[in-house]
Image (spheres, helix red, strand yellow):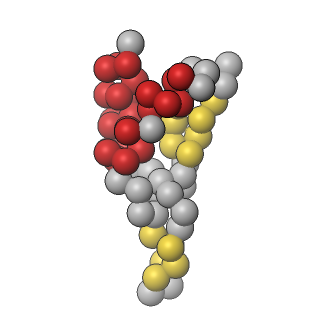
Amino acid sequence: PILVHANAGLPVHRDGVDHFPDTPEMMADLVPALIEAGANIIGGCCGTTPAHIAAIASAVAAAK
């Protein structure tokens, strides 16, 4: 199995807080290429929210 556990982009430190710029839609757009590359487990790490995971799950379902 190949696991992809990506951050929501590279963090930007602003006002003493790290912000992650990638939207749920941006992460979901990457799903077809990740599956094509062999990923069979796709999740999220730093900066991801439930909305990111929902968008990824929808993209995975659409790719089947």
**Total labels drawn:** 0
Residue, far top: 64
Please determine whether, in this image, residue 26 is positioned above or below residue 10.
above
Please determine whether, in this image, residue 12 is positioned above or below residue 4.
below
Residue, far right: 1
Quadrant for the C terminus in the image: top left
Please determine whether, in this image, residue 52 is positioned above or below residue 22.
above
* x then y, percent, for residue 42: 52, 31
Between 33 and 40, the residue placed more toward the observer is 33
* x then y, percent, for residue 29: 38, 39
Q: Is residue 53 visible?
A: no
Left or right of 37? Residue 47 is left
Q: In which quarter of the view is residue 57 placed? A: top left
Between 32 and 7, the residue placed more toward the observer is 32
Residue, far bottom: 15
Q: Residue at x 44, y 86 (%)?
A: 15
Q: Residue at x 59, y 26 (%)?
A: 37
Q: Residue at x 35, y 53 (%)?
A: 23
Q: Is residue 14 visible?
A: yes
Please determine whether, in this image, residue 13 is positioned above or below residue 32.
below
Between 13 and 33, the residue placed more toward the observer is 33
Left or right of 39? Residue 26 is left
* x then y, percent, for residue 33: 49, 30
Q: Residue at x 54, y 63 (%)?
A: 10
Left or right of 53? Residue 17 is right
Quadrant for the N terminus in the image: top right
